[in-house]
Every structure is written in C-alpha cells, then in structure tokens.
Amino acid sequence: MEQYIIKGGTPLVGEVVIGGAKNAALAILAAAIMTDETVHIDNLPDVNDINVLLEAMEGIGAQIKRIDRHTVQISGGAVHDFNIDYDYIKKIRASYYLLGALLGKYKHAEVALPGGCNIGSRPIDQHLKGFRALGAEVEIEHGKILADADRLVGSHIYFDVVSVGATINVMMAASMAEGMTILENVAKEPHVVDVANFLNSMGANIRGAGTDVIKIKGVSRLHGAEYSIIPDQIEAGTFMFGAAVTKGDVTVLNVIPKHLEATIAKLVEIGCEVEEFDDAVRVVSKGKLRHTQVKTLPYPGFPTDMQPQMGVALALCEGTSTITESIFENRFKYLDELARMGAVSKIEGNSATIEGVERFSGARVSAPDLRAGAALVLAGLAADGITIVDDIVYIQRGYERFEEKLRELGAEIEKVSSEKEIQKFKLKVS
C-alpha cells in the first residue's frame, strides 16, 4: 500500500503548471463516443479516474489510442455493447456519463447503479427524471439502470436540485434528441460549460451553458473534432492553499483566473496576497492568517471540492472560523484526522467550528477521500516533524504527479510503500 511521507516546515515557493480538469475530462471522454468519427482530445490529466473510464469505454468497443500522456484519440464507430459493468462504476462514479452518451447516440444504455462514495450520497434521480422527460423508458433492475427509447424528443425540464452530473448527462442525451430541449435550474460549473463547448465542436447546438437556462436544439448526427480540456480549478486551488498554509509564494500557471474567484476571495479574506495574470495566479502568505466564515455552494460559490483545503488553512488561522457544507453530508471526515495533528474543531450537523492553533505536529493520518487526502498532505507540509498519509490511492484518482509537483516547489515529500523506505526517508531528512 503506497503512502506519502512528508517532513513539514518548508515554505512552498516557485511555479507549478496545472493540468486539465478531471471533472470536465470524464464527461468529455464519455461524450466522445457520440460520433462514429475520430475525436482528438488533449490536456487530459493522467490520473487513475481517467484511465479507468478509458478502460470502460474500450470494454464496450470504443477504439482508444493514447497519443501521449495527455492526448487521446477516440473512435466510437465500433461501439457494440451498451452495458457498463459495475466493476467500473465501483471504481469511478463518473462512468454514469456513458448513460447520457449511449442513450443520445444509440437510444439504449445499461449502466450499473453507482454506489455511494465517502463524501456522501449522490442521488441520480434528476438524471433519470431528465431521460424520462426526453421520452426514454428508464427502469432499475438487478442493480442496473436500463434506459431505452424508440426516439428522444426535446422537452422542457426543470431540475429540482442543482446537479452537475444530471445537467451534463441530460444535456448529452438531449443534444441528439428531436427538436428543442430547455433545461432550467442547471449547474453552471466551468466543466459544464466545457462539455457543452466540446459537444458544440462536434456539431451539437447548445446555448446558455454557464447560465441558469440551457437551450439545446437536437441534431441527428455529430462529427469528429479536436478539443483541449480546460485547466483544473481544484488542482490550482489546492496548490494556492499550499502556499497559504506553508507561508509560501506559489504561482499557478495554465489557469483561468475567473474560475478561481471564490477561492481567491477566501485567500484574501484570511490574509494572503493574491496577484492575478491572464493565465496565472500568484499567492503569497507572509504574516499570521485571520479567521473567517465559509459556506460551500454551487458555482460560482465556494466549491465543495475546496472545502477540506480551506479547513486546513482555517485550523492555522487566529481565532474561530466556521464552515458550512451545503453540498455533501460526509465532507468533514478529514477533521478527525487533522485532530491527530493538533487541530481543534467541533462538528454539528453540516457545520464545523474550527479554533485556530499556532501549529500542527506531524502524525500518521489516513486519506478518507480524494480532496480530504490532498488537504492532509497540505497539513503535513505545514506541520512540525514527519507526517505519513495512508490510503493515497484516493489522491492519485485526481492529482497527477502530486508529490513531484510539490517537490518542485521545495517540499520534502516522497511516495513510499514499505517500512524500509519510511526509515530511509527519515534518515535522509534528519
């Protein structure tokens, strides 16, 4: 089992290049099989979730050619199976995007029902409501979602809750339905816009992505395209908070500053200096950090995926801070791990009260999920002494070359898989 071992206390300083957005890439890869022609996608992050989805797509007949680490060529012309196995869904929930893609193109899809995940339940009722509104018959049998339609017809759909997954999945299916579909109360996240732009590059007719109403005029076929995925705002934000907690000076390159506005606002509130450029953001952390309040909200609000990184920073701020988590119910598990390092917090329902401490001390902690795992690494970088983070398989699902990028900024961190390697690291840094 691989772990990260970290000797904390060194400020992160320098520049880091941000990769493609994992959450955009997962949906875009699924949408790529909606044409028989070849699709060329670059700025793909090389992370476990992406590789699992590509495997799932190969399993149903898609031809996948890896050009290099960040570029893939996909041809959906030979897709012959519409059944996505539970093994893939178990590893990566976003396999359910193949539901919208297959239903749109072939009017039939079978996808195993996704289970819960460590940050809470993510119901898919809004996805199914959308598919039914387009004219599909949707049943759940033997742990599978079966969606079938003679034809899909445009409809006016109002989502009961804002859901990124449902917005993307229904948008994909509707792009090949007959007539006009209007989606209301939709998610506005940058990756929703990116998926719409990608579908449009293949010949879809989607307007309004990024606003409250998306209008889709269905087309009968989609064609090949070349597309580059947007930068990952969550990876960028993680390194920005790394600068904050280690008293560092980090410039994140290859970003869209507009996507980072909520993160930047909170960094400024707690006392960091932030400088914005066309495609880069610099974060400098000098003096003591100040407490604040934060509430996670759908975009353009503060992202739930940045909440654990924010929590680590608040645990080192002067005074009492509160976090209200309005998206996922189990997103505070990292605070129990952080307590081992000296953090003081109290959780009540969907709120956490955090009392700032002077410093963390290194300890052995376990990553409960992807973003919480990355946040615990940041805590280790800020702590006195040695921190070991277990279960880093979660972190590798969404961060490419995480430890290497941190080392390039001056961090003392290594990936290890044995007691011998742990001892070797300790000798080296002592």
Image (spheres, rainbow, N blue to C red):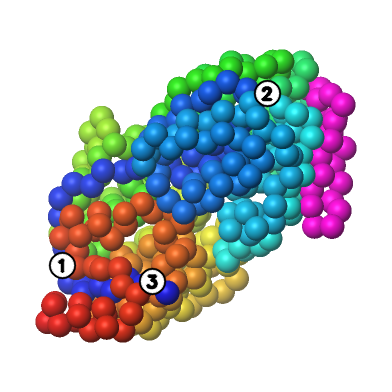
Contact, CB < 8 Å: mark 3 with mark 2?
no
Q: Which comes before the other along the chain, label 3 or label 1?
A: 3
**Which SS class for mark 2?**
loop
Of circles 1 and 2, which is in front?
2
Residue 182 seen in the current view = no
Residue 294 at x, y percent in the picture: 44, 57
Task: Name the residue type under label 3.
Answer: Glu
Q: Residues within 10 Å of mark 1 (few under 14, many from 20)?
A: some
- 266 vs 277: above or below: below
**Which SS class for mark 3?**
loop
What residue is at 47 percent from the left and 63 percent from the top?
394
- 298 vs 407: above or below: above
Give the alpha-carbon distance from disc 3 to disc 1, as whole Å: 23 Å
Q: What stretch is highlighted in magenta?
A: 133-154
- 44 vs 332: above or below: above
Give the alpha-carbon distance from disc 3 to disc 2, as whole Å: 42 Å
Task: Name the residue type under label 1.
Answer: Thr
Q: How crowded is mark 2: few (under 14 residues within 10 Å), some or many (20 or more)?
A: many
- Per the image, the residue denoted by label 2 is 175
Contact, CB < 8 Å: mark 1 with mark 2?
no
- Per the image, the residue denoted by label 1 is 10
Name the foreground residue: 102 vs 399: 102
Residue 173 seen in the current view = yes
Of circles 3 and 1, which is in front?
3
Corner quadrant of residue 148:
top right
Circle number at residue 2: 3
